[in-house]
Amino acid sequence: MLKKSWSTACPDWKRRIIAGESLIPLDPLFKESAELALKIFKQLRLVDVPGEPMMGEVTREWVYEFVAAIFGAYDPQSGVRLIQEFFLLISKKNMKSTLAAGVMLTALILNWRREAEFFIIAPTVEVANNSFKPAKAMIRADNELSDLFQVQDHTRTIIHRMTGATLKVLAAESDTVAGIKGTGVLIEEVWLFGKRAKAADMFTEAKGGLASRPEGFVIYLSTMSDEAPAGVFADLLKRAREIRDGKRIDNRMLPVMYEFPQEMLDNGTYRLPENFYVTNPNLGASVSEAYLTGEFETAKADGEIALRRFMAKHLNVQIALSLTADYWPGAEFWEKSGKEPQVSLDWLLEHCEVIDIGVDGGGLDDLLGISAVGRLKSNPRMWAGWFHAWAHPSVLERRKEIAPRLLDFAKQGDLTLVNRIGDDSDEVAAIVAQVYASGLLDKCGLDPHGVGSILDAMLEQGVPEESVVGVRQGWQLGAAVKTAERKLAEGCFIHSGSNMMNWVVGNARVEQRANGILITKQASGTAKIDPLMAFFNAVSLLSLNPVAKGSVDDFLNDMIIA
């Protein structure tokens, strides 16, 4: 019998995960449904394990709990599944693909709907094969299942001979996934879909079957992304965490997320090998402790980029700032300085004694970036920065690989999508005029090439021409780059830590030129760095130590009072 009230929230998950307890906050809603599914699931054979044991002989308890939660949400009397979405976030090598195969085979066996369609949707052919092969092997290792199912290797399809129901494993990069209406859908490696512009539409289609199939379900499986989460993956993470933490009431989804509590991330204890078990519930089984420790030592020796990737894939540590080869050294300190969410343009106007502004970009294929950098009244050694960007929607079509990120930044308020070229210049000019009117503006620095429309807009807004200067680019900007690095390393620069700037800073690549360094858009490829270049323009001006506006007047007033 169903309990009168139940919740998929798990507000005490931090205590549970450290103690190695279950992350599933409720017992199966329908015990008989869960027990029947587990009976089938536990008899599936693992052919890639020595001795080919059954699932029920070697599998960890957390797996059974997850399977029981999925199938135990089904009410056999009404034919309705009360929890229809499930999200498992787990580190690499914790038998994720094997679990996917086992769950979907169990669903196909239990299904009563004739001609029902079940899908495993993978981002690539390789990931698709990782799920199809264990499912095929489980069938061929069991005589009864071999009689019950027909396996079509060339289409990665498994057909139930009695009901005509099918399980198809689709690779999104090559197979057609639009328009599917599955009774049960499992989506593998959601983090990779987060990089795709049309993934949100595909996810909507995948969930569409739930409207007409009340017994249906959608399962999301993923490791953490090896760069800052984006698109559908970022949205799913946010929703799942809010449900888990009790901040959003949505009992249609059950999130099971193996990740470190924030306290462990802040104090660095997540890096201790004795704590690797936290995000690796299969440590000692499908995950070798010696292998994991060895990979950790190798990553440390290989440098910051390798270490971040290890943390993301093997420890589920979310990356805020992704580093590429030849990354800008200041990027290593960017995250640490970006823990002041209150730093906005208005905050700068209130707390700074002088402000310089940098502007860069603005082509149809670019972002238009602005950065305001100010010197604090309370401590002139401390600087603070604010950033924003604009883009024409055509960039979303021209650069589809970054479109999900740009849309995320727009939702977060750090990027504005303009419908008409020129609106961006007007908005930049309005910001510069606002700072000028406050009496805090020293100068606004622009790339001297192609700034006519922006300069005209500023003049129309009442910004004096002498307040707008050209900033030499290329190697001549190297001093500003070095100044920015030192300010960050010394802990003398703060910012809000926006996802947009984390992405932009991670995109920057350094070229060594003689005794100097060069950061250019060409070196960064299709990734965008315009707001960062705007930042360097502003730094180049503020590093000249401009006199704070009103300083002379204040001095004269003090003299009169004296």
Image (cartoon, rainbow, N blue to C red):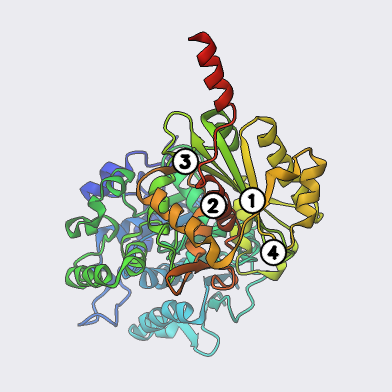
Who comes first in sequence, dot 4 or dot 2? Answer: 4
Task: Give the structural element (helix, strand or loop) at label 3.
Answer: strand
- As drawn, the label of residue 540 is 2
Query: What amino acid type should be assigned to the residue bearing mark 2?
Result: Ser
**Pointer 3: what residue?**
383
Q: CA distance from mark 4 to mark 2?
A: 31 Å
* Local crowd size for mark 1, using a 10 Å CA cut-off: few (<14), some (14–19), many (≥20): many
Q: Nearer the viewer, residue 526 or 379?
A: 379
Q: Earlier in the sequence, mark 1 or mark 3?
A: 3
Q: Which of the two marks, 3 or 2, is nearer to us in this view?
A: 2
Residue 258 in the image, given as x and y percentages of width and height:
34, 55
Task: Compare residues 248 and 267 and report the one nearer the observer.
Answer: 267
The mark closer to the camera, 1 or 4, is: 1
Q: Residue at x 45, y 53 (%)?
A: 484
Nearer the N terminus, badge 2 or badge 1?
Answer: 1
- Amino acid identity at mark 4: Leu
Q: Pinpoint residue 314: horizontal percent, then vertical percent.
A: 31, 65
Contact, mark 1 vs mark 3 (Cβ under 8 Å) = no
Task: Write down the residue under mark 4.
Answer: 396
- Mark with earlier residue (3, 2): 3
Mark 1 and mark 4: Cα distance apart in space: 28 Å
Residue 530 appears in the rendering: yes
The residue where tag 1 is placed is 445
Q: Position of residue 80 (x, y in %)?
A: 54, 52
Distance between the alpha carbons at the discs numbered 1 and 3: 17 Å
In the rendered view of the protein, which quadrant contains the N terminus?
top left
Amino acid of disc 3: Trp
Residue 71 is at least partly visible in this image: no
